[in-house]
Amino acid sequence: MTGPLSVQSPAQSNSSVLQMECNNFEDPSEITSYSYRIQSNGEIVVDWTDAGIKDMFSNEHLQLKSGQTYTTEVHALNGGGFTSSDVKSSLIVALEPPELTGVFYRIFVVS
């Protein structure tokens, strides 16, 4: 949750747990809590949930579907009652191993 989305989202094979970590939120009024939500294809999987002051949290007992992309949004609340902009990160759930293509790549390291 530390930067913009890459071209290719990371993948995981666990279909029941999403673990999130957010960092680099800073505020002179001190952060008092974080909130997150999880979406997939425009549908809310988990609505805004208060995570307290912890910067690492997980949501268990989910029923994530293979092949779908899940996006987590996180924002921070400060001592003045102001909420930060949302930070987003996505991943793909892949329950099946990738297909072997038979294409062979050789990587050369030049030092």
Image: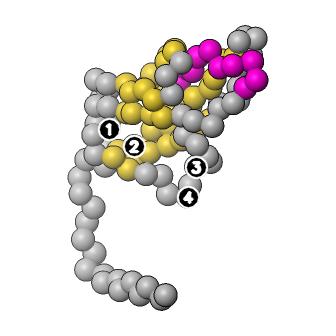
Residues under numbered marks 3 and 1 in contact, where contact means CB atoms less than 8 Å apart? no
Mark 1 in CB contact with mark 4 (< 8 angstroms): no
Q: Which residue is mark 3?
A: 5
Would you say the magenta stretch is mainly helix, strand or loop? strand
Q: Earlier in the sequence, mark 1 or mark 4?
A: 4
x, y (%) of residue 83? 70, 20
Q: Residue 105 sits in which quadrant?
A: bottom left
| Three-letter residue code for mark 3 | Leu
Element class at badge 4: loop
> Mark 3 to mark 1: distance in Å?
21 Å
Q: Is 11 placed above or below 86 here?
A: below
In reply to whether residue 34 is colored magenta, the answer given is yes
Mark 2, secondary structure of its residue = loop
At x 25%, y 80%, the residue is 102
Q: Which residue is mark 1?
A: 65
**The magenta stretch spans which residues?**
27-37
Residue 40 located left or right of residue 105? right
User: Are the residues at dot 2 and dot 1 in contact (C-beta closer than 8 Å)?
Assistant: yes
Frontmost of labels 2 and 4 is: 4
Q: Nearer the viewer, residue 93 or 84?
A: 84
Mark yes or no: residue 30 visible.
yes
What number is the disc on residue 7? 4
Q: Secondary structure at mark 1?
A: loop
Residue 38 position in % (x across, y down): 48, 29
Question: What number is the disc on residue 88?
Answer: none
Marked residue nearer the N-terminal end (3 or 1): 3
Residue type for callout 1: Lys
Residue denoted by label 2? 68
Residue 1 spot, x, y in % from top left: 54, 40
Residue beneath the point at 47% across and 52% down: 9
Measured in 3D between alpha carbons, the distance from the residue under mark 2 to the one under mark 3, in whole angstroms, is 16 Å
